[in-house]
Image: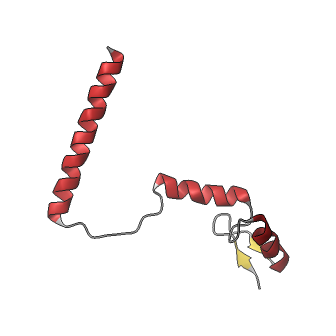
Amino acid sequence: MKSRCPVCRKVMDEAGQQSSREGGFYPFCCNRCRMIDLGKWFDGDYRIPAEVKPEEAEDISEETAKGENAASQRDKAEND
């Protein structure tokens, strides 16, 4: 049975799949593709869609504003 690497789409035959399993990167064809996928998770490229209620959206925007304000104050203090 053949399968494809989810990152580079390389076709792996049974021998390639076995090698990938032994190397610890299955379902990816190699460690490079495994790390690319991990980076996408860290960067937030993969997201689970969710409905945000209006009151939750207000809370999130207030928290974001507070975080941006704190960051700009920290940057200003570092530059002084």
User: For residue 55, what is the image quadrant?
Assistant: bottom left
* Residue 70 x/y as whole percent: 26, 34
Point out the residue furthest to the top here: 80
In front: 74, or 5? 74
In which quadrant will I find the N terminus?
Answer: bottom right
**Direction from residue 59 to residue 4 in the image, left or right:** right
Q: Residue at x 30, y 22 (%)?
A: 76
Q: Is residue 25 above or below residue 62?
A: below
Residue 63 x, y percent position in the rendering: 23, 47
- The residue under the point 47% across, 58% down is 45
Q: Quadrant of the C terminus?
A: top left
Would you say 66 lies left or right of 44 here?
Answer: left
Number of residue marks: 0
Q: Is residue 75 left or right of residue 15?
A: left
Residues 24 and 60: in front is 24
The colour scheme used to paint the residues is: secondary structure
Q: Is residue 11 positioned above or below 61 on the image?
A: below
Task: Determine the image quadrant of residue 22.
Answer: bottom right
Measuring 23% from the left and 54% from the top, which residue is drawn there?
Answer: 60
Q: Residue furthest bottom?
A: 1
Which image quarter: residue 18? Answer: bottom right
